[in-house]
Amino acid sequence: MNFLQTVKIALRALRTNKMRSFLTMLGIIIGIAAVIAMMAVGTGASYVISQQIASIGSNIILVMPGSTTSGGLRTGTGGAQTLSSDDAKAIMADCPSVAYAAGTVRTAGQIINGNLNWSSVIMGGSPELFDIREWPVVNGRPINQQDEDGAIKVCLLGQTVAENLFGSADPVGSIIRIKKIPFTVIGILDRKGQSPQGQDQDDAVFVPLRTAQRNLVRSQRSGIVSAIIVKAKSEESINKAEDEIKALLNQRHRITNSKEPDFSTRNLSEILAVAEQSSKAMSMLLGAVASISLIVGGIGIMNIMLVSVTERTREIGIRMAIGAKKNDILLQFMTEAVMLTMLGGLIGIALGAGGATVVSKLLGWPTMISIQSITIAFFFSAAVGIFFGFYPAKKAAGLNPIDALRYE
């Protein structure tokens, strides 16, 4: 008996008991649908995290000021004013693995355009900041070195600020007031979206660093910055650049082995790697939990196939009596089990993809259905059929023809 005949007989046997076949497949259907949906949600979340971190820029190292101690209490990272614009310039000049370095200061305030106003983040940064953040200007011009050197009162608007202060009008060339100080809008930045912390990166106004230091931010010493953002020349040189920055700042700040550094560094590539690893682990966990229903479905298939063997004992005896071999009987029941799981897998894949789409639209969760997850789910369903169908098929093939013919 050839394989095509075996498949036809298996389909006829499944059609004979349509309801029982469907109920048998139900565990597989639910399991595959759950696996597809969970992996789609997990993959989508991983993609969004990667995009959000990538929106900050690639190969970035963040240098933060250290802590200060007052009355025995330590303020933590950022509590002291220990970094300066000169530190940023020295990093870019003296660290071979560094492409750009930019000092930044940050404050918040009210921005006014005529009778419209908007409260937003105000960032002061040198021109290199926008190369580091890979943040182009889509309308107007960027902040240049002349603006920085002359502490010119010019600004770049994020998309959110521009929309709330100007609507659909072109703001380039307009005068706005930042903390009651007039600034000329010279450009609009491209849209960035949310940061990994969920903040709207487009809800910000950027001014030259020296302008911010002189007019918008009060500090005890001139030239103080709240952070230095550094871009390494390549992904491979990030760790080397970080070591060079630490060595240079230790030398500039006279930090010895017995003295605690007054700064700290953070490698955003490491944060990305940890976030992606966490997301992958969560996807695997969700997939593993959903796979439990596949095992339950497989056990259900084994039970039903054992019942089928009992019901069809006389049929098996007749087939053996007219020349069917044990391998033919084994293949017959294995084919039926695999077809049950594969049909259930196909239905489950369709339901899982549909469920992921519904979740994405109703709840706004990002989902991504990959060909890899569909392929794995399909072949896993076939493997379940082979594994759980083997014992009933072996039992059917091992029946004694004479005893099977006498079975009532």
Image: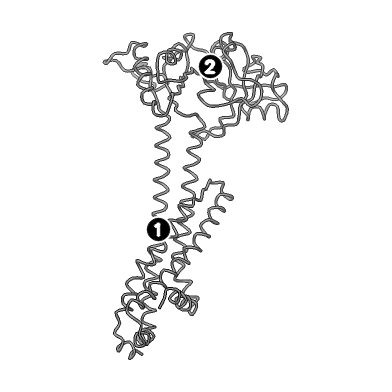
Tell me which amino acid carries mark 2. Ser
> Residue under circle 1?
291
Element marked by disc 2: loop
The local crowd at label 2, few if under 14, some if 14 to 19, many if 20 or more residues have their Cα within 10 Å, is many
Q: Is residue 204 left or right of residue 259?
A: right
Viewer-proximal residue, 206 or 177?
206
Q: How many marks?
A: 2
- In the rendered image, residue 270, in percent from the top left (x then y), is placed at 39, 32
Residue 201, compared with residue 29, is above or below; it is above
Q: Quadrant of residue 323?
A: bottom left
- In the rendered image, residue 51, in percent from the top left (x then y), is placed at 51, 37
Name the image quarter holding the C terminus.
bottom left
Mark seen at residue 223: none
Tell me which amino acid carries mark 1. Ser
The local crowd at label 1, few if under 14, some if 14 to 19, many if 20 or more residues have their Cα within 10 Å, is many
CA separation in Å, label 1 and label 2: 53 Å
Viewer-proximal residue, 125 or 350?
350
- Going 33% across and 70% down the picture, which residue do you hit? 390
Looking at this view, name the residue that lies furthest to the left. Answer: 258
Q: Is residue 309 left or right of residue 132?
A: left
Residue 29, compared with residue 405, is above or below; it is above
- In the rendered image, residue 139, in percent from the top left (x then y), is placed at 66, 25
The answer to whether marks 1 and 2 mark residues whose Cβ atoms lie closer than 8 Å is no
Viewer-proximal residue, 14 or 37?
14
Q: Earlier in the sequence, mark 1 or mark 2?
A: 2
- Going 46% across and 42% down the picture, which residue do you hit? 46
> Residue under circle 2?
126
- In the rendered image, residue 214, in percent from the top left (x then y), is placed at 55, 10
Residue 346, compared with residue 11, is above or below; it is above
The colour scheme applied to this rendered structure is one colour
